[in-house]
Structures are given as structure tokens and as C-alpha cells.
Amino acid sequence: MATQAASKDLSETLRSTAQNYVDEMIIAAQNQARLGKDETDPGYTALLAEDERWMNPRAKIGIGPVTTHMALYSAIRGAAGHVALAQEAARVDIALSYDEFPNLEWPAEVDFILVKDEWRLRAVRLGIRRPLPVTASPADVLTTYVEQMQHHLARRDALDDDSWTRQNLGRNWTLGGGGYWRWLKDCKKAEADICLKARLGSALLWSTLALDREKTVEIGDISGGPDAPAAEITVKIKRRTMVEERKFAVTFLKDKRHGWQISALTKNDETVEPDAVDLTVDASNGTALVASLLKAMIGPDAPDSMALMADPSILDPYFADTRDGKKAAAKVMTLKSMLPVFGIKAENAVYETLPGGQVQVSFKDARATAPTLVFSIANDASGAKITAMESR
């Protein structure tokens, strides 16, 4: 009886600790969502700062991604529930509620670990990647993916240009796939290039749906059989004298833990193959390399997105032949379809050399929400190479 009582008391203590911590996260997320793109809520800063409640006070697993998720999806409460106890570890289940999904409780988890007779936080994570059960069919996954993307585009358009939420909604869908895509970390090493190229489709569809024109979206029936399902999305865009149709082919892969996920989305044109692309590379130094890359991507003679999609290897001379270099190349290809939305032009780029071999690029006369790009540079026998890229 004494052991059961002690276990019950410990469960209540951990449940209360998890509840209080999730409450802190939700308040910080709500406040952050109201701020401008260059502002940070003090509560959010405190969450990311060193915290002795954690096993590793400086490396708090999941805090950034989960709090950002709460902000973007308008979390309103989190209810601590079941506590699973082991000898030196514990997990508290959390049911998150959202304004955006009134009929859904999004599962999350708070993990604890026993360190020198003291229970400390170990990780916070979401139990699912998208607002659907693991058993959802490919048709349900695709329909919800498109509907939710459209919902977030409408929400984004209603926000101020300098809104933190507006900027991060775009990143969530173009870089994160909204949680509907196969994650890069789930790809085998031999599939890395395929997975990176496949993810570009998310930005392609987002930029199409973001066009300021009257449009309708049609989702075709699932084909291809139970083991290799596929579908087609048709976006009909009303022009002055005609209706343009853009078709996107979608394929799926099934994950044991997360169910059906989108594995690729490509523009399904019946046009001729794009002409070969000849890009000029100036690898004499980091700034010259980045300038030649931006000119190639968004300059007046830049190839269209489909030409790049047809042969992404044409960007190889700009980037280091490493996993991070390839990730940077994929990010740049994604940005190609996004940068013009911010009014960005290559000739308006302002370059600044940062310590540690980095080149920062900002843009004159761009919209307030336009990102600043930071490129990490290294040199090899052939000259400067981009080793990483981030947008701020």
C-alpha cells in the first residue's frame, strides 16, 4: 500500500509539473503570435534560456518547435493526463486544444528523467505531426493538407506584413510541409537527394495557392493501388482571357508510426522539356559566389522553377558536396518561388560579410516581411562553396 501511495503521489507531482510547464508554453506562444517578426516575447525567451528544471539546462529538446507549433495553430489549453512511470523515467500525456481545431485534442508528451534523486524535464514533443489519426487514408491526408494550407494562406493574408505569425506560417508550409510530408530524418542516407528534391513541391503548391487571383482547387481520386497510392491536384486560375490550369502529381509512402505521408509533389505539365540551363558561377570569394547565385536564381535571365526541378544538379557548383551543402541547395530552390512574393529583386541585394566566413544578404525596397539570408562559406581547390544557408 505504501508503494502504491508513493507512486500515486509521484504521478500527481509529475502531472502538476507538466501541466504548469505546458501552461507556460501556451502563454508564451499566444504572446509571441501577436508580435512583429523581429520581436520576441519575454516568456518565450525564458523558455529557451537556461533552466535548472531540465536534465540539460542548455539543451531543451522540443521546446522551440512545439512552442512555435502552439503559436501557429492557436493553442488555447493543454490538459495533463496519464502518467507512465518507469524506474528512472516518466512520461506525462498532454491533450492540446486549439481554436483552429475545436473538435480535436492534439496529443503531446512531456518526458522526465531521474537525476540524482530529482525528477527533471527531458523532452517535450508532439504525439502526431498533423491533425489526423494515424489511420487516415491517403485521400483524407491530401484533402486535409490542401484545405489547411488554404486556411493558413487566408489567415496569413489577414495579418500585417511585419507579423511574426505571417512570416512563420510560410516557413511552416514551405520548409516543414505542415506536418504532412515524409520528414527528411526518416529518409535513408541513400535517399537523401531524392527526399530533398521532393520537398520542393510543398513550396511550389504554396506559391501557386498564394497568387492573388481567383482560383479553384480540385483533388482527383486516389489511384496507383494500395501499396503505391497517387493523386493529382488541379489548380484553376482565372486570367483575363482564359483559365489557366496547373496540375500537381502527388505520391505517398506509409510510415509505421505516422501513417500515410506525402513523399513527393511535382508540377505535372504536358509541356516540352525545359531548355538546358547555363548558370554563371563566380567562386572567387564568398560574396561574389552568393551574388552570382542570387542572379542565377532571381535575376532577369533566371531559369524557371521547372528547369531547376528537372535538373537540380545545375546548382552543384555553388554548394559544398556535403549533406548540409545539399540541404542549403534545396532551401535555395524553395526560396526561388517565395522571394518574388516579398518584392525581392537580385539587383536590390545588399551584401555584408560576417565573422566566421558568412555572407549576409538583405534587400532594399522589399516588403517588411522579406527574410534576411545568411550563407556560410568555405573554400576548396575550386574556390568558394556554400556550406549552409538560413533565413532570418
Image: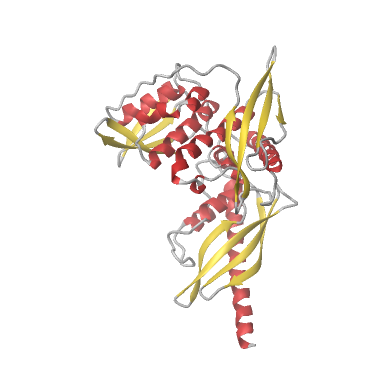
Instruction: State the residue lying farthest toward the top.
Output: 241
Instruction: State the residue lying farthest toward the left.
Output: 381
* 143 relative to 352 in the view: left or right: right
- Marks counted in the figure total 0
Report the residue at 50% width, 21% height from top: 304
Display colour scheme: secondary structure
Q: Which image quadrant: the N terminus?
A: bottom right
* 71 relative to 59 in the view: left or right: right
Instruction: State the residue lying farthest toward the bottom.
Output: 1
Q: Position of residue 179 (x, y in %)?
A: 60, 45
Q: Position of residue 68 (x, y in %)?
A: 56, 49
Residue 227 occupies quadrant: top right
Q: Position of residue 270 (x, y in %)?
A: 60, 19
Foreground residue among 4 and 222: 222
Q: Is any part of residue 362 visible from this angle?
A: yes
Foreground residue among 152 and 330: 330
Q: In the rendered image of this protein, does residue 64 appear above or below residue 169?
A: below
Residue 213 occupies quadrant: top right
Report the residue at 64% width, 79% height from top: 8
Q: Position of residue 257 (x, y in %)?
A: 60, 54
Foreground residue among 221 and 64: 221
Report the residue at 64% width, 24% height from top: 246
Q: Is any part of residue 210 visible from this angle?
A: no
